[in-house]
Image (cartoon, grey):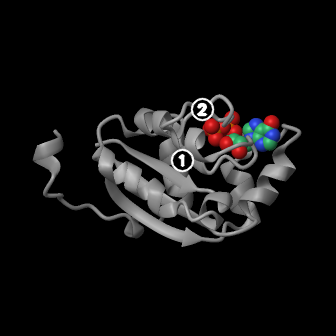
């Protein structure tokens, strides 16, 4: 089954949105494979956002993502990578539709509440960056046959 990396950013943690965001993925039918509240060290932030190194907002992005705790998660399920991106909404909250996380909770691109991997390659890279193998749990859920 496909896995993706989802993270409630520091603004989402401070604004008490962790429970709502976890709940959306649970209710959709995805399975939680790992989760932790953590403070991202600078080096990890720079590596995670490496593709934006040359962008003018890179410094601001690293400063923001390290400014407070984040809630890092791995979610599992059919097409979870693309579906989670749909559930998050567009990067700019002004373009994110109501009903999406960013559409419901965000106003600015810098503080857009949530991160989610955008491809199978980034999902694998980001899961390995943020989680050790022994922090991920493989288990059966009772609702499996009611979802698939
Ligand atoms: P994504 O998070 O939807 O995948 P990316 O283009 O990968 O979007 O950008 C990563 C993050 O960088 C965004 O979520 C956003 O918080 C931040 N970001 C993107 N563009 C800007 C900008 O112009 N100013 C400040 N932050 C930005």
Q: Secondary structure at mark 2?
A: loop
Q: Residue at x 50, y 51 (%)?
A: 6
Distance CA(mark 1)–CA(mark 2)? 26 Å
Mark 2: give few (<14), some (14-19) or many (20+) Cα within 10 Å: many
Compared with 133, 124 (above or below) is above
The residue pinned by badge 1 equals 125
- Horizontal side of residue 38 vs 65, given as left or right: left
- Horizontal side of residue 5 vs 142, given as left or right: right
The residue pinned by badge 2 equals 96
Is residue 52 among the parts visible in the rendering? no
Location of the N terminus by quadrant is top left
Q: Where is residue 74, by image quadrant?
A: bottom left
Compared with 84, 26 (above or below) is below
Query: Where does ligand 1 appear, by image quarter?
Result: top right
Is residue 3 among the parts visible in the rendering? yes
List the single residue furthest toward the left: 145
Q: Residue at x 26, y 61 (%)?
A: 138
Compared with 67, 64 (above or below) is above
Front-most of 144 and 1? 144
Q: Residue at x 59, y 42 (%)?
A: 102
Location of the C terminus by quadrant is top left
Q: Position of residue 121 (x, y in %)?
A: 50, 37
Q: Position of residue 114 (x, y in %)?
A: 59, 49
Q: Which mark is residue 52?
A: none
Q: Position of residue 92 (x, y in %)?
A: 69, 34
Tell which tag, 1 or 2, sits nearer the viewer: 2
- Horizontal side of residue 129 vs 50, given as left or right: left
- Horizontal side of residue 17 vs 14, given as left or right: left
List the single residue furthest toward the right: 56
Mark 1 touching mark 2, by CB under 8 A?
A: no
State which tag comes first along the sequence, 1 or 2.
2
């Amino acid at each position: 089954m496909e896995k993706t990396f989802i993270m409630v950013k520091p603004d989402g943690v401070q604004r008490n949105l962790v429970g709502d965001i976890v709940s959306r993925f649970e209710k959709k039918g995805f399975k939680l494979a790992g989760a932790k509240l953590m403070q991202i060290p600078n080096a990890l932030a720079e590596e995670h956002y490496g593709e934006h190194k040359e962008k003018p907002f890179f410094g601001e992005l690293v400063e923001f993502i390290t400014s407070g705790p984040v809630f890092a998660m791995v979610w599992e399920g059919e097409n979870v990578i693309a579906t989670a991106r749909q559930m998050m909404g567009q990067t700019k909250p002004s373009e994110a539709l109501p009903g999406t996380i960013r559409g419901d909770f965000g106003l600015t691109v810098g503080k857009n509440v949530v991160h989610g991997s955008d491809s199978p390659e980034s999902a694998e890279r980001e899961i390995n960056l943020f989680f050790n193998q022994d922090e991920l749990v493989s288990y059966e859920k009772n609702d499996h046959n009611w979802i698939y």
